Image: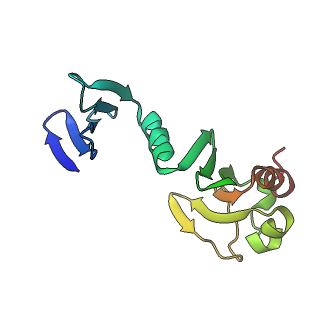
Amino acid sequence: MRISELPEIGTKYEIESPKGDKVAVIFLTTGEIELYVLESDADKPSVTRLTSEEARRLGSVLTGALLTIEQEDIEVSFSEISDLRIHIHLCPVTKNVVGKSIEDLAIRKKTGVTVVAISRKGQSIVSPPPETVFEEGDLIVAVGKREQIKACQQVILGQG
């Protein structure tokens, strides 16, 4: 892979396949991404411009880790494990859980959801221990199956 800085344009990454096809990705200073493909027997490359979200989705397809993003919910699926779907969800803490711990609420036992992080006043608590007490304004990052996430929102957070 060759990497080139393009002054006032962006950064270009180029790769060439064993049969001579060339692919160039240019990350523009505007935040957009241009994708060029020049097949070995072609005179001109084909080109498309992607938003950063479209580029992320394409990247996840190419790596086999598919992401589907809906509002505050991300679904991750893997090409090698076709039946595995993991949902990552961002939920605001509700008043009925403020002052209670992950352990007090038995979130995993009752719903199957794992709390993997909490965002609190601009700080992240990654892998919070069970004794972590929720505070007003906290955002919970939860992982589980779609139905487990829904159960957590209804049973624990009272959102539904």
Q: Whole-percent x and y of residue 138?
A: 64, 57
Whether residue 48 is visible here, answered yes or no, is: yes
Vertical placement of residue 132 versus 22, above or below = below
Q: Is residue 143 left or right of residue 160?
A: left
Q: Is residue 101 visible?
A: no
Residue 65 drawn above or below residue 106: above
Relative placement, left or right, of 59 versus 116 is left
Q: Position of residue 126 (x, y in %)?
A: 56, 68
Q: Is residue 16 above or below residue 111?
A: above
Q: Which quadrant of the figure contains the C terminus?
A: top right
Q: Nearer the viewer, residue 53 or 83?
A: 83
Left/right of residue 76 with respect to residue 99 in the rendered view:
left
Q: Residue at x 68, y 59 (%)?
A: 143
Q: Position of residue 144 (x, y in %)?
A: 72, 58
The image quadrant of residue 112 is bottom right
Tell me what residue is drawn at x 27 percent, y 47 percent.
Answer: 18
Image point 79% across, 51% down: which residue? 153
Looking at the picture, tell me which residue is in the foreground, 65 or 56.
65
> Viewed as shown, does residue 75 lie left or right of 19?
right
Q: How is the image coloured?
A: rainbow
Number of on-image labels: 0
Residue 56 percent across, percent down from the top left:
45, 42
- In front here: 90 or 95? 90
* Residue appearing at x 68%, y 64% in the figure: 115
Figure check: 90 above or below 114:
above
Image quadrant where residue 152 sits: bottom right
